[in-house]
Image: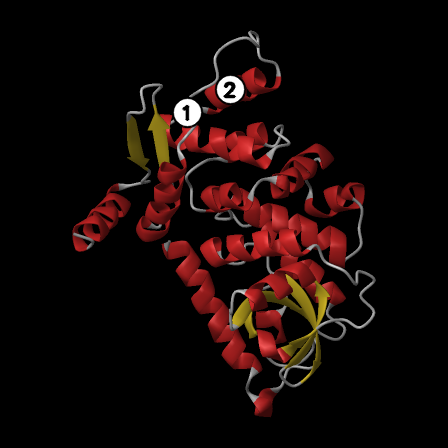
Amino acid sequence: MAKATKKQALGRGLSALLKDPANDIKSASDKNADKVVGNIVELELESIEVNPFQPRTSFNEESLRELASSIKELGVIQPITVRKLEFNKYQLVSGERRYRASKMVGLETIPAYIRIANDQESLEMALVENIQRQDLDPIEIALSYHRLIEEIEVTQEELSERVGKNRSTIANYLRLLRLDPIIQTGMRDGFIGMGHGRALINIDDLSDQLDIYQKILTDNLSVRETEALVRELKNPRDKSAPKKPEIPPFAKKAKKELSDILETPVNVKVTKSGKGQLVVSFKNEKEFDRILRVIKSEK
């Protein structure tokens, strides 16, 4: 939780910088431009317009509502990209679904990467330098690789040479972006490591991904144990084996409500007889104390 707050605070600070008309940043050579290039900025949605040349004109309403629900619960995990048109005016480059879904749930701001005039070289330098940092989580690294490929328009081979990493390493990071957003958030918050994420990528169905993710948290599974679970799911040895008891609707509803209230993953276990357990995840003593205070306050 603390890491997310720190990033949002940084985004708000940069947003204030961009609202200074006396020092408007118009190009990469302007004062303070280096603070914006390659960083995440919190922008007001009303200051962003869609790209009139966007080739995609129709959006699946159901998938948009699902994305809106995810954003309402977890926030915008992958920032959008915009280009600066004029003072406090921007145009979407990528991320229109995230933009639309954010408006749908009533958000006022959205995390964004800003492209400014002649910033190509500066952006590449900022992103490559960012990747070399030691404190980045796997999803942050994956997003930086993704931006370099999409915005600088390089292949994975060319990117491999520029950042000094094997192409297979880059590919493994990029594949993490196919994980369910909840799992990506869990990785960013330190609940699971990259090894767990790489194992979960092999599962196509997102609901199955989430089921194993919850089991990792509940049973504190190692990467090897997770890989074994994934193999078993993809190649069950006994297809006639009984299915695990289905979680009843009331428990599913309570699971989501508790997760929202406690701001941490909550898992439900049920037996054939209908008995069950609620398992609340925490990553350290500080997190445990916070959850305990929340529970006491709800009495």
Task: Answer with left or right where residue 17 lies relative to residue 9.
Answer: right
Q: Which residue is mark 2?
A: 229
- Can you tell which of label 2 and label 1 is closer to the viewer? 2
Q: Which residue is mark 1?
A: 221
Within 10 angstroms of label 2, few (less than 14), some, or many (20 or more) residues? some
Q: Three-letter amino acid code at disc 1?
A: Leu
Say which residue appears at 48% left-offset and 35% top-offset: 193
**Labels in figure, total:** 2
Task: Answer with left or right where residue 211 lies relative to residue 120.
Answer: left
**Disc 2 to disc 1, C-alpha distance:** 10 Å
Q: Three-letter amino acid code at disc 2?
A: Leu
* Above or below: residue 191 compared with residue 262: above
Pinpoint residue 260: horizontal percent, then vertical percent. 37, 51
* Above or below: residue 23 compared with residue 229: below
- The label on residue 26 is none
Within 10 angstroms of label 1, few (less than 14), some, or many (20 or more) residues? some
Dot placed on the residue nearer the N-terminal end, 2 or 1: 1
